[in-house]
């Protein structure tokens, strides 16, 4: 699979000790003041960002009093805010942030990367034009592409979480407590820096409660059990059947979506799934069982 090199560069001053995880709610007690985020507590912004593009504000907080607001503009330029770049995590870690994305046309980016490895770790886009959530992932043909995996509700708080399982070579993505996609590690095998930003349009976002910590922060016994779901063989063929195995006994509701987000299969099964109607390509398989939902990637050749 083609690796993607580090795309987003900024020299940020590291203010945290080695082996530090990273948690912030942008509060005064953490050293933040209301106003331009640039230059506060080691944060920087891309050169194209005008002053006060990203502001610490006393509104829309999900934890404490403050949040960061990205103010809308009309340049159509990708503008980014960079955390300090000396975060250190273990092979199992979680990255989560509370977001509220305004209705409109802007595309919000959530990015993690490793400046040491000069590689991107993850990149996810939230498109306000169609409310889609798009994960940069293996396209099944040796390259990378943004795959639509779910939708979000604009002007509403939600928590976006990435669980990084580097030893297993996988990253799982959650909206609130629901798993929406399980993908492969695409490049970097650690996270040293967090980036949030957007392509300017007529809408912005607020962000709060950023946590980059060791371990799996997702909650719920059913979520843990569904994270052990397996689909095999994977890759499959257009003439075959795949088996979905789960630690929970019983029937599963299965919906399969193509890379454009179109539902191509919707069925109930106890394990076997006929994929003979599918064309070669990459699909998202959403599996629901006993009130829990997980999403897996299926490659059909």
Image (tube, rainbow, N blue to C red):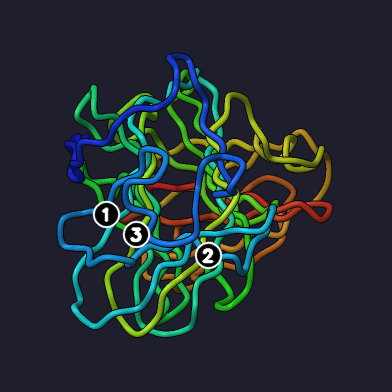
Q: Residues within 10 Å of mark 1 (few under 14, many from 20)?
A: some
Q: Which mark is residue 86?
A: none
Depth check: 259 or 77 in front? 77
| Residue that carries the numbered disc 3 in the rendered image | 197
Vertical side of 298 occupied by 85: above or below: above
The residues tagged by marks 3 and 1 sit, at their Cα atoms, a distance apart of 19 Å
| Residue that carries the numbered disc 2 in the rendered image | 57
Element carrying mark 1: strand
> Where residue 25 appears, x then y in whole percent?
59, 48
- Which of the two discs, 3 and 1, labels the residue nearer the N terminus? 1
Q: Residues within 10 Å of mark 3 (few under 14, many from 20)?
A: many
How many numbered marks are there?
3
Depth check: 49 or 200 in front? 49
Residue drawn at the location 50% of the way across and 32% of the way down: 164
The residues tagged by marks 2 and 1 sit, at their Cα atoms, a distance apart of 34 Å
- Which of the two discs, 3 and 2, labels the residue nearer the N terminus? 2
Q: Nearer the viewer, mark 3 or mark 1?
A: 3
| Residue that carries the numbered disc 1 in the rendered image | 145
Q: Quadrant of residue 49?
A: bottom left
Q: Is residue 250 visible?
A: yes
Element carrying mark 3: strand
Q: Nearer the viewer, mark 2 or mark 1?
A: 2
The answer to whether marks 3 and 2 mark residues whose Cβ atoms lie closer than 8 Å is no
> Where residue 271 appears, x then y in whole percent?
68, 45
> Where residue 38 appears, x then y in whole percent?
32, 52
Vertical side of 284 occupied by 235: above or below: above
Residue drawn at the location 52% of the way across and 50% of the way down: 181
The residues tagged by marks 3 and 2 sit, at their Cα atoms, a distance apart of 16 Å
Is residue 155 toward the left or the right of residue 9 in the image?
Answer: right
> Where residue 153 appears, x then y in whole percent?
58, 75
Is residue 230 toward the left or the right of residue 170 in the image?
Answer: right
């Amino acid at each position: 699979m083609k690796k993607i090199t580090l795309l987003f560069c900024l020299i940020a001053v590291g203010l945290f000790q080695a082996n530090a995880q990273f948690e912030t709610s942008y509060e005064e007690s953490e050293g933040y003041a209301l106003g331009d985020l640039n230059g506060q507590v080691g944060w920087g912004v891309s050169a194209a960002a005008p002053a006060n593009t990203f502001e610490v504000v006393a509104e829309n907080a999900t934890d404490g009093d403050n949040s960061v607001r990205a103010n809308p503009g009309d340049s159509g330029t990708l503008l980014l805010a960079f955390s300090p770049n000396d975060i250190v995590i273990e092979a199992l870690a979680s990255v989560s942030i509370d977001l509220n994305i305004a209705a409109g046309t802007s595309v919000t980016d959530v990015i993690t990367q490793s400046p040491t490895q000069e590689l991107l770790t993850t990149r996810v886009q939230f498109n306000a034009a169609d409310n889609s959530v798009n994960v940069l992932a293996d396209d099944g043909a040796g390259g990378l592409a943004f795959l639509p995996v779910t939708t979000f509700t604009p002007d509403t708080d939600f928590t976006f979480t990435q669980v990084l399982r580097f030893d297993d070579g996988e990253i799982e993505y959650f909206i609130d407590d629901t798993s929406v996609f399980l993908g492969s590690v695409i490049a970097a095998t650690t996270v040293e820096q967090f980036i949030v930003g957007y392509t300017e349009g007529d809408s912005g976002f607020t962000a709060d409660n950023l946590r980059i910590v060791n371990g799996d922060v997702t909650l719920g016994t059913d979520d843990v059990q569904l994270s052990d779901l397996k689909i095999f063989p994977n890759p499959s063929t257009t003439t075959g059947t795949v088996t979905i195995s789960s630690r929970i006994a019983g029937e599963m509701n299965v919906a399969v979506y193509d890379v454009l987000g179109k539902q191509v299969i919707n069925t109930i099964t106890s394990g076997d799934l006929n994929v003979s109607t599918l064309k070669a390509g990459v699909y998202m398989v959403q599996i629901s069982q006993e009130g829990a939902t997980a999403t897996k990637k299926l490659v059909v050749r």
